[in-house]
Amino acid sequence: MQRVSLSVPIGAGVVCAVVGFTSSFAVVLTGLRAVGASPAQAASGLLAACVLQGLGMLALVIRFRMPITLAWSTPGAALIASTGIVEGGWPAAVGAFVVTGVLIVATGLWSGLSRLIALIPAPVAQAMLAGVLLPLCLAPVTALSHHPWAIAPILLAWVVLVRFSPRWAVPGAFAVAVVVIVVDLVRSDASINGDQLLPQVVWTTPHLTVAAVTGIALPLYIVTMAAQNIPGVAVMRTFDYEVPWRPSMGITGLTTVVGAGFGVHALNLAAISAALAASPDADPDRNRRWVAAVSAGVAYLVIGAGSAAVATLVVLAPEGTIQAVAGVALLAPLAGALSAAAGFDTGRAGATGTDAKAATGARTAAIATFVVAASGTTFAGIGSAFWALVIGIGIHLLLRPRRPRGITAPDAP
């Protein structure tokens, strides 16, 4: 086995943290502001999320000597961005974040809750996520039509980097956005208060409302489990690591509960970025890759110290700039969700009888879920994500063909 310098896994961990932060922080700030957070409260949420996921990573890695990396729920941030302000405002949203954390902890303690999540049809869950992501992914197009000179350089940088270095496409787009923001500040002769650049946390007392629990907490929990935690475990298995499920859910759930009052919406296992620390590129020796996760955890603590400055830039950004960065950051999750939502139809082109009816029913349920989620409609004070799940599951059950008596379904793989 090739022996490499310790600087290799350390560098891999730093890259993991930098890519993870720059590729999705705009989505997090967008989501927090959408559910009622002030600029200071949103900045507090970003800081607390960086610090808590860094500490959570260090705790898990030191205990299990595995390259376990954590992240905030990017799909969850997109979901709350599409939900908007619920009854009770920002304190109610914070209360929903607490409930989400409690549910994540309960998932680790009670296997029945995991099985209950698994009963939700995958096409329906993924179609809900795709519907939530679609409006945010359309934002760059809308912004380009209104502010072409500010948005075009961002999108151009993203396209070029997707071609030559996909990993750095979104961070590169953000770097160009920073240049656009600075140029705009210079032209407008705007001034920045130095206090805004210093990290600070803002406490909000959680408040529980039915609308927030059903409209934010439940969809946020489902999206976090289906799009982050479960795929995160699968990614780690591809590198021969078995993630300790109960401790991981305990750490991510508890840090979510602790951080909710400071603006943290949901923390979870890293999925896509997990490979940056767990793959052979981090270190040919799999027994030393945990060093990369330690490096990532420390890097997040350092990044947290500068998160207030980043949040201040976002507040001062020209209209549409940060939305453009968030939109391109979510294109890959949107493509994955659409692909997974359509995956039920794979290999069924020649299906007949019961299989054909099942495919048609699943397709109809997924399409209905997608449309309702993308509509952004609020009913009875509850956002579209919840109603998309209710309607999608209902249609799926209604159209699911009944098997003739005497025929049993095959065992699940």
Image: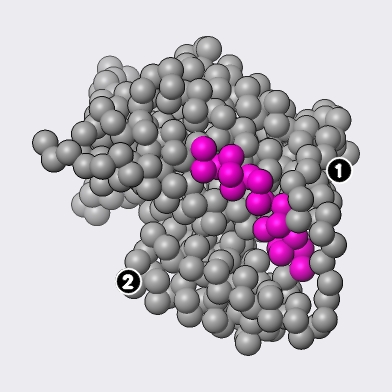
Q: Is residue 364 left or right of residue 95?
A: left
Q: Is residue 286 above or below residue 23?
A: above
Q: Is residue 215 above or below residue 170?
A: above
How many marks can you see? 2
Q: Upstream in the sequence, badge 2 or badge 1?
A: 1
* Mark 2 and mark 1: Cα distance apart in space: 43 Å
Quarter of image, res 141: bottom right
Q: Is residue 154 left or right of residue 93?
A: left
Where in the figure is residue 401, as x and y percent of width and height? 39, 35
Asked whether 336 or 181 is in front, the reply is 181
Q: Is residue 356 left or right of residue 306?
A: left
Residue 270 visible: no
Q: Is residue 21 left or right of residue 413?
A: right
Which structural element holds mark 2? helix
* Residue denoted by label 2: 164
Quarter of image, res 118: top left
Residue type pointed to by label 2: Phe
Where in the figure is residue 370, as x and y percent of width and height? 55, 53
Q: Is residue 319 above or below residue 265?
A: below
Q: Which residues are magenta?
A: 298-316
Q: Is residue 314 magenta?
A: yes
Q: Is residue 315 above or below residue 92?
A: below
Give the number of the disc on residue 89.
1
Give the number of the disc on residue 37.
none
Which structural element holds mark 1? helix
Which residue ends up furthest to the left in the rendered image?
Answer: 1
Quarter of image, res 194: bottom right
Where in the figure is residue 322, as x and y percent of width and height? 65, 66
Residue type pointed to by label 1: Gly
Residue 62 visible: yes
